[in-house]
């Protein structure tokens, strides 16, 4: 059974930081491209950061310079360090795994940026 379990979300003030984690099980993690997506109320789900199996990382323009994604194949985990958070970063953040045509999603973790 495949599971992607996110953690680390919460309420933070503007300018603050959070670190999201995603632990994967049931897959050969090192083969999968991993990604972080987010979905704000009334908006489409969007890619925040993508980490391919080889290690290259791409970021959405809106988070570049503030967010840092990483993966640890030994721990079957990916992370998203979010700094200088803004109210517009408020969303449910999802972990995503993809290998060829096979994709999996986590259940999501809420991030709220508000004073």
Image (cartoon, helix red, strand yellow):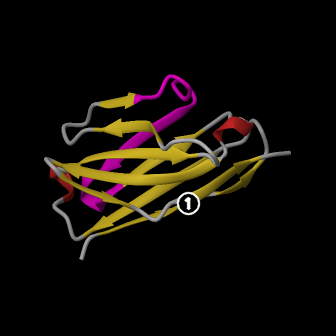
Q: State the count of labels.
A: 1
Q: Residue furthest right?
A: 115
Q: Find numbered disc 1 in the image and state the secondary structure of the residue it sits on.
A: strand
Q: Residue at x 51, y 42 (%)?
A: 44
86 in relation to 6, above or below: above
Q: What stretch is highlighted in magenta?
A: 59-77
Q: Which residue lies furthest to the bottom in this view?
A: 1
Residue 85 counted in the magenta span: no
Q: Which residue is drawn at 47% across and 57% down?
A: 21
- In the rendered structure, the answer to whether residue 99 lies left or right of residue 72 reads left
Where residue 64 sits: x, y (%)? Answer: 51, 25
Quadrant containing the C terminus in the rendered view: top right
Depth order, front residue of 110/66: 110
- Res 11 → quadrant: bottom right
Quadrant containing the N terminus in the rendered view: bottom left
Residue 75 counted in the magenta span: yes
Q: Which residue is drawn at 55% across and 29% down?
A: 63
Where residue 47 sits: x, y (%)? Answer: 43, 38
Q: Residue at x 68, y 33 (%)?
A: 84
Q: How crowded is mark 1: few (under 14 residues within 10 Å), some or many (20 or more)?
A: many
80 in relation to 74, above or below: above
Depth order, front residue of 90/40: 40
58 in relation to 105, above or below: above
Where residue 48 sits: x, y (%)? Answer: 47, 37
- In the rendered structure, the answer to whether residue 83 lies left or right of residue 87 reads left
Where is mark 1, residue-wise? 109
């Amino acid at each position: 059974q495949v599971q992607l379990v996110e953690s680390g979300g919460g309420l933070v003030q503007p300018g603050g930081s959070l670190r999201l984690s995603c632990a994967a099980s049931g897959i050969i993690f090192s083969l999968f491209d991993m990604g972080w997506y987010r979905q704000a109320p009334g908006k489409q789900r969007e890619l925040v950061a993508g980490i391919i199996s080889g290690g290259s990382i791409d970021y959405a323009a809106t988070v570049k310079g503030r967010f840092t994604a990483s993966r640890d194949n030994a721990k079957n985990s990916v992370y998203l360090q979010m700094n200088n958070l803004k109210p517009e970063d408020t969303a449910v953040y999802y972990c995503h795994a993809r290998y060829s045509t096979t994709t999996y999603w986590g259940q999501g973790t809420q991030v709220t940026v508000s004073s």
